[in-house]
Image (cartoon, coloured by chain):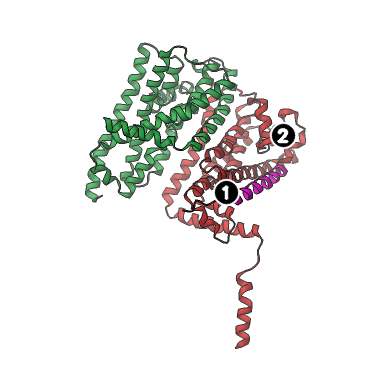
């Protein structure tokens, strides 16, 4: 357990090193936040209460999306590129000899990364957004805590998805195609482009049931106070359920894949 | 015999070192490097087709989002779906072309960091041509074709009163728009000489600008519209020409004829970006690695 805490701290420190990149990222998140906020304002101007959000809630949703974009890695990228490279070059064989659990090792590092991105890339755009627009912030500390739990679960779901993406390299050798598919699904089905409440009919129902909705839609709704009491327990169960299923799928694929490595001789 | 040798020796330097201007030299080098990357891409055709389709789909989701928005409303910022499709298609095509030709500029910071830019400096070819053609990605045609498709849909659906001026303006707009975005790519590259790991700032202006131009100016705050008209003149990429074609009012109360200024604005942008590039290249200090 101590080992994984150290790995997580390492993940945090590693991303904290790139200060100019973080500043540049904050700038980008803010620019896109402004553009999206204005388009949402035009939309909610036409239809107040669209999707059950009022104008302030819709604008808050936009800025939450920018704040969580890197934390929950909606667009993909991060540890999985490194893992794909290790699989491609065969370095993965060395990793498998280590007396640590491969999946937990990468998860710990990714949690550290997420913690840094939440602080480094999340707070400043949110503050800038709230200066320019009328946003709604949770009044009770309880909602903030509930939000952070939802974000943490979202990060685990995101990790589990990207772990599967990376493992596909055992068969495909080149992860670019799968990574691109996962980028597309992440952007569209996390609710990053448009809240999933606005997706019509069956598309909406499917989108809300898919694991990507755990990345942004659920944490944002928790932040906006849409889920309380048993409703909160229910969405946590939704996120945790997907996390569990996807992590187990990752384990399964990994055990099949590692047997392949042995056959190939690394 | 001696005459023959003389003739050969005398001829050879001329034949090999034909004096060319820097511009011709740059374009030629760009073409050669692009051809090299094309051959390399086409070695894996299936992979290329998949990447191009992915590129197409990635940008198509932007338009799907707009269509989903219009499942709830009839107008956005006072504009109908076909009108927004015109803005979207023109911005997408112009940006797609610039991205295809100059999109590799955002890798410059990476090259400065790892020191591989030095290799480019010692070659007798303009650095900008080498950087721009580096890893030329034909898959970016996906974005261009997606933009053209939406553009075509808009032109077919909209009931435009065509005049000669409007017919001339449409292709002029796309080409000038691509030129303006290319200048932004070059200026962004120049900025990366200074701030090596800030390629994201460049993305805000390129990808961010393209996203901004998909929506009508009436959606945005006046100060933002002022900024993209007079500071980073993205409004000339498609907003002003499209508003002319649609016969709509301009933002900021600009006169009618400014829609035709796009080529001029593109020229000014190129000069500015060229100067910035030169300054950036002069300021470059190798990592020594």
Q: Which residues are magenta?
A: B263-282
Farthest bottom residue in view: B1
Residue B73 in view (yes/no):
no
**Closer to the camera, A192 or A113?**
A113
Chain at numbered mark 2: B
Query: How far from the left and from the top, in percent, is residue A72?
Result: 41, 29
Residue B278 colored magenta? yes
Which chain comes out green in the rendered image? A
Query: How far from the left and from the top, in percent, is residue A88?
Result: 33, 48
Chain B, which colour? Answer: red
Crowd rating for badge 2 (residues with CA inside 10 Å; few <14, some 14–19, many 20+) = many
Which residue is identified by label 2?
Answer: B244
Residue A57 colored magenta? no
> Within the image, what quadrant is residue A217 found in?
top left
Dominant SS of magenta comes to helix
Q: Is residue A130 above or below residue B25?
A: above
Residue A115 in view (yes/no):
yes
User: Sequence order check: which comes first, mark 2 or mark 1?
Assistant: 1
Position of the N terminus of chain A, as image quadrant, is top left
- Disc 2 secondary structure class: helix
Crowd rating for badge 1 (residues with CA inside 10 Å; few <14, some 14–19, many 20+) = many
């Amino acid at each position: 357990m101590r080992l994984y805490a150290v790995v997580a701290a390492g993940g945090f420190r590693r991303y904290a090193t790139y200060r100019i990149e973080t500043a540049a990222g904050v700038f980008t998140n803010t620019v896109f936040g402004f553009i999206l906020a204005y388009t949402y304002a035009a939309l909610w101007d036409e239809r107040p209460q669209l999707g059950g959000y009022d104008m302030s809630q819709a604008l808050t949703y936009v800025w939450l999306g920018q704040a969580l974009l890197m934390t929950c890695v909606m667009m993909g990228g991060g540890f999985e590129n490194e893992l794909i490279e290790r699989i491609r070059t065969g370095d993965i064989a060395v990793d498998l000899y280590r007396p640590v659990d491969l999946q937990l090792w990468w998860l710990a590092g990714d949690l550290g990364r997420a913690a840094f991105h939440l602080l480094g890339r999340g707070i400043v755009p949110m503050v800038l957004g709230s200066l320019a627009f009328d946003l709604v912030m949770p009044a009770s500390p309880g909602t903030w805590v509930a939000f952070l739990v939802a974000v943490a679960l979202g990060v685990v779901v995101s990790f589990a998805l990207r772990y599967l993406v990376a493992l596909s390299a055992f068969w495909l050798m080149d992860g670019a195609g799968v990574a691109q598919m996962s980028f597309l699904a992440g952007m569209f089905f996390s609710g990053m482009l448009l809240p999933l409440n606005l997706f019509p009919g069956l598309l909406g129902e499917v989108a809300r049931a898919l694991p990507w909705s755990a990345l942004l839609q659920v944490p944002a709704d928790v932040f906006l106070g849409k889920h309380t009491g048993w409703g909160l327990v229910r969405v946590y169960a939704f996120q945790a359920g997907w996390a569990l299923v996807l992590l187990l799928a990752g384990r399964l694929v990994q055990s099949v894949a590692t047997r392949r490595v042995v056959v190939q001789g690394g | 015999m001696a005459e023959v040798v003389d003739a050969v020796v005398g001829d050879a330097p001329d034949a090999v070192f034909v004096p060319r201007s820097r511009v011709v030299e740059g374009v030629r080098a760009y073409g050669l490097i692009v051809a090299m990357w094309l051959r390399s891409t086409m070695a894996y055709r299936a992979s290329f087709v998949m990447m191009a389709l992915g590129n197409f789909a990635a940008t198509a989701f932007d338009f799907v989002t707009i269509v989903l928005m219009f499942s709830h409303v009839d107008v956005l910022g006072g504009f109908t779906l076909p009108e927004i499709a015109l803005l979207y298609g023109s911005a997408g095509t112009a940006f797609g072309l610039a991205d295809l030709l100059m999109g590799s500029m955002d890798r410059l910071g990476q090259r400065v960091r790892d020191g591989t830019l030095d290799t480019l400096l010692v070659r007798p070819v303009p650095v900008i041509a080498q950087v721009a053609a580096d890893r030329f990605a034909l898959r970016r045609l996906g974005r261009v074709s997606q933009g053209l498709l939406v553009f075509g849909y808009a032109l077919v659906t909209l009931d435009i009163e065509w005049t000669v001026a409007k017919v001339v303006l449409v292709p002029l707009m796309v080409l000038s728009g691509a030129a303006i975005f290319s200048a932004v790519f070059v200026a962004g590259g120049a900025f990366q000489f200074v701030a090596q790991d800030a390629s994201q700032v460049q993305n805000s202006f390129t990808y961010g600008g393209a996203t901004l131009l998909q929506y009508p100016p009436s959606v945005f705050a006046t100060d933002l519209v002022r900024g993209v008209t007079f500071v980073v003149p993205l409004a000339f990429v498609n907003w002003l020409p499209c508003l002319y074609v649609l016969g709509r009012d301009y933002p900021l109360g600009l006169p009618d004829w400014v829609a035709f200024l796009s080529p001029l604005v593109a020229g000014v942008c190129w000069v500015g970006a060229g100067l910035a590039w030169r300054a950036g290249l002069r300021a470059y200090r190798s990592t020594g690695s």
